[in-house]
Amino acid sequence: MQRKTTQRTAIEQVFLNEDRPLGIEDILRLGRTQVESLNQATVYRNLKLLIDKGWLKQINHPTMGMLYERSGKGHHHHFHCRDCNRVLELPGCSLKQETAAPEGFIVEDHTIFLFGVCSSCAACPR
Ligand SMILES: [Zn+2]
Ligand SMILES: [Zn+2]
C-alpha cells in the first residue's frame, strides 16, 4: 500500500510542479524523476482515481489526444506552443459566446485551443 501512495503522490506532484495540462508521456517522464518504477499501467490507474476524486479532469486536444489537468480552475482556454510543445492554460475567456454563432443558435459550451509560440520560446528562440 505504501508504494501505491508514493506513486500517486509523485503524479500529484508532477501536476503541482508543472501547472499545465499533461499527456501520459509527460506524466511518465516527469513522474519517473521522483519514482523510478513508475509505469504506464500505474499512471493510468492513478489518473482514473484522481479523476474520480475530482482532482483531475480530461481535456481532448485536437492533435495530441487526451490530456489531463487540475480541475476546479473554472472555464479557460489553452495555448499550444509549437516550439516547446507545451500546452499552457490561458486564464479567463475572451470569446463573446452569444455572438459567436448565427442568430437562433443556442451555444452551450466551447473549447478553444490557440496555437503559436509561447512567451519563453519567443524570448529565446532555439
Ligand atoms: Zn514554448
Ligand atoms: Zn471561453
Image (cartoon, rainbow, N blue to C red):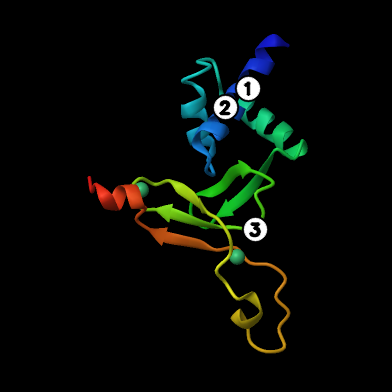
Q: Amino acid at mark 2?
A: Gln
Residue receiving disc 2: 13
Residue receiving disc 1: 9
Q: Position of residue 88 (x, y in %)?
A: 48, 49
| Disc 1 secondary structure class | helix
Residue receiving disc 3: 75
Identify whether 90 is placed above or below 40.
below
The quarter of the image holding the C terminus is top left
* Nearer-the-camera pick, 30 or 76: 76
| Disc 2 secondary structure class | helix
For disc 3, the neighbor class at 10 Å (few under 14, some 14 to 19, many from 20) is: few
Q: Is residue 17 left or right of residue 76?
A: left
* First reached walking from the N terminus: tag 3 or tag 1: 1
Q: Residue furthest bottom?
A: 103
In the figure, residue 42 lies in which quadrant?
top right
Q: Position of residue 14 (x, y in %)?
A: 54, 30
The reply to whether discs 1 and 2 touch (Cβ–Cβ < 8 Å) is yes
Q: Residue, x 46% and y 62% (percent of image)? A: 114
Q: Residue, x 59% and y 53% (percent of image)? A: 60
Q: Position of residue 81 (x, y in %)?
A: 39, 52
Q: Position of residue 43 (x, y in %)?
A: 61, 28
Identify whether 103 is placed above or below 19.
below
Q: Residue, x 68% and y 67% (percent of image)? A: 109
